[in-house]
C-alpha cells in the first residue's frame, strides 16, 4: 500500500529553500530554530518531516507556507522567491500555489463542509458553475458528499480533516503542506486520510510535505527527512 | 460568501448579539421619537407664528426699521390697491389683509394702561392668533367695539358691555380719543400678548388715527415653503409701486422661531451624541470580545490566502449588520412608541404659550436618517479598532491563539 517509488523523472522543484535560518530572541537569549535549511520538493514528492518536539518542525513549516519570514535565506514556491513578495502577493501565492492542512483542521465554524471547501475558490473568483463542479468532485473524492451541508461541529475529527484536505486541494495547488494531519485522529481515520493523500499523490501527482510524529505517516512518504536542532538530514525510506 | 460569514458570525453568540442589537434598537427608537417630537414642537411654534404674522408682510422700510417719523410710512389706499392687484397674480397667495398697529393709552374707569392695539379686517382673516374666550368675535360692522386680552380684562375687572376710552396720536401728530365697547375677551398665544393687546376693526383704527392708510399688508400663503418664491417675485415688483416698500418673511418677523429650533436641535444633538457614545463603547466591548475569540479563524483564512483587507471588510460588514438590523427594529419600535404617546393624549405647554397642546408626534421616515447614521457610524467606529488589531496580528501568532 505504501508508495516507495521515487518519481520517474526529475521535474522542477515546486518548493525550494536555500540556507534558510530562523532565530528568535527570547529574554536576551538567541534561539536558532533553523540553522541553514537547503531543501527541495519536486512534483509528486511525498515528504515527511520528522523530529522531536522543539526541533523546529513547525517553524520550518511556517516558513515554507510563507506565513512566516526566515531570518536568513530564501524560499522559492514554483519559481517565485517569497522574500521578494509583498504581503498581498504572498497571500495570492498561498491561495494559488499552496494548500495548507492544520493539525486542528481549522475549518470556518459558521460554514458548512461544502462552503468551507468552496471558500478558497471564491477568493480566486472562480465561476459558480466551476465552483460547484470542483467542490462536488472533492467532496466525492474525500467521501463526504452526504455531509456537504454539515457544519464542522456536526462532524467527527476525521470528517473535518477530510474537509480540510479537500479545501487545501480544491484550488489545484502544486503542493500541500500539512502539520500533523493525523495528530487528532484515531487509527482507523488516520489510515483513511493517509490513503486519500496517497491516492492524490500517486494519481494526481500532487506534492505533499507533511510534518509528523507518526511513524505510520512516514511510512507512506516517498522521502523522509529528520529535523534535529534546526538541521535537516534526509533518510532513505525503508 | 463574505456576507454569509458575516451574517452567520454576527449571530454566533446570541447573548452578545441580543445585547448589542437591543442597545442599538433602544437608542434608535429614542432618537427617532425625539426627532418626531422636535418636529412637532417646531411645527407648533411655526403655526403659532404664522397665525400671528401670516406668511409675508409688506410695509414701508421705515415701518420695519422704526426710523421714520410716526405714520409717515403708512401705505395709501391707492398703493394698497396696486399691491393687492400684484398679489392677485401670484397663485400661492390665498388672502391679503391690512393691519394697523397702535400704541394707545386705555382708560377704564379710573384706571389707565398702555395697550397695544391692532386694527384688523375680520372678514379677511389673515390674523387668527386669538380665540374668543367670552363674548363674541369682531365683525366688519364693528366700528365702536373691541376685544380685550383675557388677562387684561381680569386685571382691571372689565366685563362685556363695559366701555373704555383709547387715547392715541393721530397720523398728523394730534391727540385723539374714541370710546369703544368691550364685546369679548380673548385668549392669545402668550401671557404678554394677553395682558396688553386689544383688537378692533381697521375702521376703528383709522378713526382713531384719522387716516385712510394702513401700516402693513399681511399675506397668507398656500404653504410656507412658497414664502421664498413669492418673496423673490415681490422684491422685484414692489419698488415699482413705491420705492420704499419692503417685505418680511414669517421667519424674519419671528427670530424666536430660529432660537427655538436651535435649542431643540442642540437637545437632539446632545442626546444623539450621548446615545452614539453609549452604543460606541458597548459595541466596542462586544465586538472586541467577538473578534478576539476568532483570531485563530482569521489566522486560518489569511493563511489560506484571504487578503487582510478582505477580512477587515468582513468585520466591518458584521458591525454594519448589527447597526442596520438594530436601526430598522429601532425605527419600528419608535413608530410604536410615538403611537402610544399620541394615543395617551399627553398635554404639553409650549414655552411662552398659555394653552397646552396635545402632543402629536408625527415621525417621518426622514427622522430615521439621523439615528440610523449615528447607529451605523458608532458601530462601524467601534468595530474599526478591534478589526485593525486582529488583522494586523502576524498569521503565525493568530494561528497559535486558542
Image: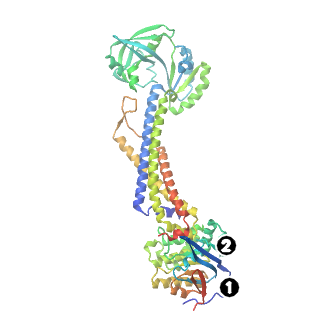
Q: Quadrant of residue A37?
A: bottom right
Residue A42 showing in the rendered view: no
For mark 2, give the secondary structure: strand
Query: Crowdedness of circle 2 by 10 Å Cα count: few (<14), some, many (20+)?
Result: some
Q: Is residue B21 above or below residue B395?
A: above
Chain name for mark 2: A
Q: Is residue B229 left or right of residue A18?
A: left
Using the numbered discs, state the Cα–Cα distance from disc 2 to disc 1 in whole angstroms: 21 Å
Q: Is residue A170 left or right of residue B266?
A: right
Res A5 seen here: yes
Q: Residue at x 40, y 26 (%)?
A: B190
* Front position in the image: B226 or A123: A123
Chain of the residue under label 1: A
2 vs 1, front mark: 2
B168 sits left or right of A90 in the view: left
Vertical order, A86 against B365 (above or below): below
Q: Nearer the viewer, residue B223 or A69?
A: A69
Sequence-first tag of 2 and 1:
1
Residue at numbered disc 2: A81
Above or below for A52 versus B262: below
Residue B352 position, x and y percent, is 40, 29
Residue at image position (33%, 16%) is B156
Image location of residue A154, percent across then percent down: 43, 73
Q: Residue A110 versus residue A238: which sits nearer the camera?
A: A238
The residue singled out by tag 1 in the image is A10
Q: Count the marks.
A: 2
Residue at disc 1, secondary structure: loop
* Residue sitting farthest toward the front: A28
- Seen as rendered, the residue at the extreme bottom is A238
Amino acid at each position: 500500500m505504501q508508495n516507495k517509488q521515487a518519481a520517474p523523472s526529475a521535474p522542477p522543484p515546486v518548493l525550494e529553500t536555500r540556507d534558510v535560518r530562523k532565530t528568535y530572541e527570547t529574554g536576551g537569549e538567541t534561539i536558532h530554530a533553523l540553522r541553514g535549511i537547503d531543501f527541495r520538493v519536486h512534483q509528486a514528492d511525498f515528504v515527511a518531516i520528522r523530529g522531536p518536539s522543539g526541533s523546529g518542525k513547525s517553524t520550518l513549516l511556517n516558513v515554507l507556507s510563507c506565513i512566516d519570514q526566515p531570518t536568513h535565506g530564501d524560499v522559492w514556491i514554483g519559481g517565485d522567491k517569497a522574500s521578494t513578495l509583498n504581503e498581498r502577493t504572498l497571500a495570492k501565492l498561498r491561495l494559488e500555489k499552496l494548500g495548507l492542512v492544520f493539525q486542528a483542521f481549522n475549518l470556518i465554524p459558521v460554514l458548512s463542509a461544502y462552503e468551507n471547501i468552496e471558500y478558497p475558490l471564491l477568493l480566486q473568483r472562480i465561476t459558480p458553475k466551476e465552483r460547484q463542479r470542483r467542490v462536488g468532485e472533492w467532496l466525492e473524492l474525500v467521501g463526504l458528499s452526504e455531509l456537504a451541508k454539515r457544519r464542522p461541529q456536526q462532524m467527527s475529527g476525521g470528517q473535518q480533516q477530510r474537509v480540510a484536505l479537500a479545501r487545501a486541494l480544491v484550488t489545484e495547488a502544486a503542493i500541500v503542506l500539512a502539520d500533523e494531519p493525523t495528530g487528532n485522529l484515531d487509527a482507523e481515520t488516520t489510515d483513511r486520510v493517509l490513503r486519500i493523500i496517497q491516492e492524490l499523490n500517486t494519481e494526481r501527482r500532487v506534492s505533499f510535505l507533511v510534518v509528523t510524529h507518526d511513524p505510520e505517516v512516514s511510512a507512506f512518504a516517498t522521502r523522509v527527512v529528520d529535523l534535529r536542532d534546526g538541521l535537516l538530514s534526509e533518510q532513505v525510506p525503508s | 460568501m463574505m456576507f454569509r460569514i458575516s451574517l452567520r458570525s454576527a449571530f454566533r453568540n446570541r447573548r452578545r448579539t441580543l445585547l448589542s442589537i437591543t442597545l442599538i434598537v433602544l437608542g434608535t427608537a429614542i432618537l427617532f421619537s425625539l426627532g418626531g417630537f422636535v418636529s412637532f414642537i417646531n411645527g407648533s411654534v411655526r403655526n403659532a407664528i404664522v397665525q400671528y404674522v401670516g406668511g409675508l408682510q409688506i410695509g414701508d422700510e421705515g415701518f420695519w426699521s422704526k426710523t421714520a417719523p410716526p405714520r409717515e410710512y403708512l401705505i395709501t389706499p391707492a398703493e394698497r390697491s396696486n399691491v393687492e392687484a400684484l398679489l392677485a397674480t401670484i397663485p400661492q397667495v390665498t388672502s391679503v389683509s391690512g393691519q394697523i398697529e397702535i400704541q394707545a393709552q386705555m382708560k377704564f374707569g379710573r384706571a389707565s394702561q398702555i395697550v397695544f392695539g391692532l386694527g384688523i379686517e375680520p372678514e379677511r382673516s389673515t390674523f387668527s392668533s386669538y380665540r374668543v374666550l367670552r363674548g363674541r368675535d369682531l365683525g366688519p360692522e364693528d366700528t365702536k367695539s373691541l376685544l380685550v386680552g383675557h388677562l387684561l380684562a381680569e386685571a382691571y375687572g372689565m366685563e362685556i358691555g363695559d366701555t373704555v376710552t383709547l387715547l392715541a396720536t393721530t397720523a398728523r401728530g394730534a391727540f385723539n380719543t374714541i370710546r369703544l365697547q368691550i364685546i369679548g375677551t380673548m385668549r392669545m398665544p402668550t401671557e404678554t400678548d394677553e395682558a396688553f393687546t386689544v383688537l378692533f376693526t381697521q375702521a376703528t383704527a383709522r378713526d382713531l388715527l384719522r387716516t385712510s392708510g394702513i401700516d402693513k399688508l399681511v399675506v397668507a400663503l398656500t404653504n410656507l415653503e412658497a414664502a421664498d418664491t413669492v418673496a423673490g417675485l415681490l422684491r422685484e415688483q414692489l419698488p415699482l409701486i413705491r420705492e420704499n416698500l419692503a417685505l418680511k418673511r414669517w421667519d424674519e418677523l419671528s427670530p424666536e422661531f430660529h432660537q427655538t429650533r436651535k435649542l431643540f436641535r442642540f437637545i437632539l444633538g446632545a442626546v444623539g451624541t450621548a446615545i452614539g457614545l453609549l452604543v460606541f463603547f458597548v459595541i466596542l466591548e462586544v465586538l472586541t470580545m467577538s473578534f478576539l475569540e476568532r483570531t485563530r479563524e482569521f489566522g486560518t483564512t489569511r493563511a489560506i490566502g484571504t487578503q487582510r483587507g478582505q477580512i477587515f471588510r468582513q468585520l466591518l460588514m458584521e458591525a454594519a449588520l448589527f447597526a442596520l438590523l438594530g436601526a430598522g427594529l429601532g425605527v419600528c419600535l419608535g413608530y410604536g412608541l410615538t403611537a402610544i404617546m399620541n394615543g395617551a393624549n399627553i398635554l404639553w405647554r409650549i414655552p411662552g404659550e398659555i394653552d397646552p397642546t396635545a402632543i402629536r408626534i408625527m415621525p417621518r421616515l426622514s427622522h430615521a436618517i439621523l439615528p440610523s447614521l449615528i447607529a451605523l457610524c458608532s458601530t462601524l467606529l467601534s468595530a474599526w479598532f478591534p478589526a485593525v488589531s486582529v488583522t494586523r496580528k502576524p498569521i503565525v501568532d493568530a494561528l497559535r491563539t486558542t
